[in-house]
Image (cartoon, rainbow, N blue to C red):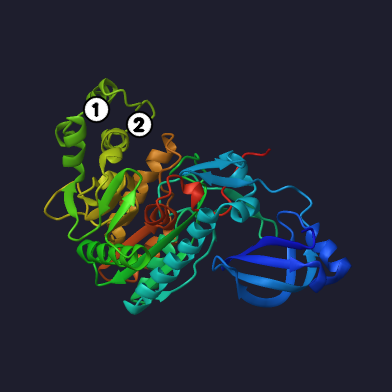
């Protein structure tokens, strides 16, 4: 032999076998073909034929080296169902995503699926009559969520700005302005820890519907996620790790207080002192040393004891007013609000409520949050006088919904770390 060679060419569309001969290419081009390394980028001309085994092959008649790969690519091999990966260091894969995408087809497939999910969300909401808008990424007041913001400075205006932690208050200003159905699908930034569920920079979809409420948004959430599962996965029963998750509606519903009681044995609606709440949480080995209120203790207990068990889809409803400063009070349950969060696969994937549209109540809630900030809670809300002013012009009854896109992609692609669904997650310096 020596005068004929086989190779494989791979791109986004798949893999095809190459067949090249010295007679067809000539001495110079055949020498180029023989000296190609794994990862080289080439341009080819030729014609298709089938080998005796029936494999479609390109008979190469011309070859051109377009870019040389001067660093060796890791080789990923599979034998008897076991993957042998020379690129097994996960941290290295995240840092060198460009290499990860080359050598791991499933990684590339995840991000192709992510793009489809985002497109489907936009299409679904547009068909529901929502208008996509864009609101500021840099804000003079960090509002719309309980989180620590990233701080920056505008030199010309000599003013402090925050990378947004949520677009909520701006989107609701648009509802005040008469834009009855709006949504935004974009990045948020929160100066917090990194885990399998958290990245400081993440993608969120928020939608607001005038003359809607919690029930309206619950229905929208259920329809949107089941639509995505059917479109992306082709079924409402999806495999996530060892669990078969059934997204078929209607999803189970239970209250915040009841779900905590079910998994911890504590009924926080009956606790009247912070000391008692902390004592009961400590007995469960839950760290609540930084919690300043009973419901903050309850939330820590919920996160550690209840949330990991919420595998099948469920709506948690009736949250405490203290934990929901932007949600409308429930007239039938004093101290609670019209709010729900959907949970699937042991994690929250969204947050929604009937929006608080009473400017006097909202100002009181903000003032209470300011007191919590002054007491050391750096995740409590800031006062936003302009948002209060907007409400004073009148906001219709409104339903609002936020869905974490990265976590939703995790669910629909069977990914178990948020960093597997973000192309370039934040990493420590090398």
- What residue occupies the far left of the structure in this picture? 332
Residue drawn where x is 59% and y is 46% of the image: 76
The x and y percentages for residue 102 are: 62, 55
Res. 67 in view: no
At mark 2, the secondary structure is loop
Give left or right: position of 153 versus 233: right
For image coordinates 37% across by 65% down, the residue present is 232
Residue 12 screen position, x and y as percent: 58, 66
Instruction: Quarter of the image for the N terminus: give it.
Output: bottom right
**Side of 115 relative to 347 (left or right):** right
Q: Earlier in the sequence, mark 2 or mark 1?
A: 1
User: The residue tagged with tag 1: helix, strand or loop?
Assistant: helix
Using the rendered image of the protein, determine whether residue 281 is visible from the camera's viewpoint.
yes
Q: Is residue 8 left or right of residue 138?
A: right
Quadrant holding the C terminus: top right
Residue receiving disc 1: 277
Q: Quadrant of residue 170?
A: bottom left
Residue 365 x %, y %:
32, 50
Asked if disc 2 and disc 1 are in contact, CB closer than 8 Å, the reply is yes
Badge 2 is on which residue? 291
Q: Residue at x 38, y 39 (%)?
A: 372
């Amino acid at each position: 032999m020596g005068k004929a060679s086989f190779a494989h060419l791979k791109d986004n569309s798949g893999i095809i076998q190459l067949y090249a001969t010295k007679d067809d290419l000539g001495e110079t081009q055949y020498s180029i073909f023989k000296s190609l390394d794994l990862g080289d980028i080439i341009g080819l001309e030729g014609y298709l034929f089938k080998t005796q085994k029936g494999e479609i092959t390109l008979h190469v008649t011309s070859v051109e080296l377009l870019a040389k790969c001067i660093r060796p690519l890791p080789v990923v091999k599979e034998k008897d169902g076991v993957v042998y990966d020379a690129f097994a260091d996960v941290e290295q894969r995240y840092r060198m995503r460009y290499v990860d995408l080359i050598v791991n087809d499933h990684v590339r497939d995840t991000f192709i699926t992510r793009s489809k999910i985002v497109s489907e969300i936009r299409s679904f909401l547009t068909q529901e009559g929502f208008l996509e808008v864009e609101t500021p990424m840099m804000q003079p007041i960090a509002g719309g969520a309980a989180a620590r913001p990233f701080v920056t400075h505008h030199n010309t205006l000599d003013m402090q700005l925050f990378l947004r932690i949520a677009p909520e208050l701006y989107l609701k200003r648009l509802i005040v302005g008469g834009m009855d159905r709006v949504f935004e699908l974009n990045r948020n930034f929160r100066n917090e820890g990194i885990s399998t569920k958290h990245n400081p920079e993440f993608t969120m979809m928020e939608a607001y519907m005038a003359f809607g409420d919690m029930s309206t948004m619950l229905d929208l959430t259920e329809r949107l996620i089941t639509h995505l599962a059917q479109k992306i996965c082709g079924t409402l029963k999806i495999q996530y790790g060892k669990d078969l998750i059934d997204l078929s509606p209607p999803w189970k519903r239970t209250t915040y207080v009841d779900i905590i009681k079910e998994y911890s044995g504590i009924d926080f609606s009956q606790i009247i002192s912070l000391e008692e709440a902390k004592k009961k949480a400590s007995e469960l080995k839950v760290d609540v040393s930084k919690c300043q209120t009973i419901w903050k203790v309850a939330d820590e207990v919920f996160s550690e004891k209840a949330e990991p068990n919420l595998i099948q889809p469920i709506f948690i409803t009736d949250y405490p007013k203290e934990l929901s400063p932007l949600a409308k009070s429930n007239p039938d349950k004093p101290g609670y609000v019209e709010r729900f969060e959907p949970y699937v696969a042991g994690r929250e994937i969204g947050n929604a409520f009937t929006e608080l549209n009473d400017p006097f109540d909202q100002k009181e809630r903000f003032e209470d949050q300011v007191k919590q900030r002054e007491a050391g809670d750096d995740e409590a809300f800031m006062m936003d006088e302009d948002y209060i002013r907007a409400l004073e012009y009148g906001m219709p009854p409104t339903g609002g919904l936020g869905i974490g896109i990265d976590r939703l992609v995790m669910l629909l692609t069977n990914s178990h770390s948020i960093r597997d669904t973000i192309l370039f997650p934040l990493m420590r310096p090398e």
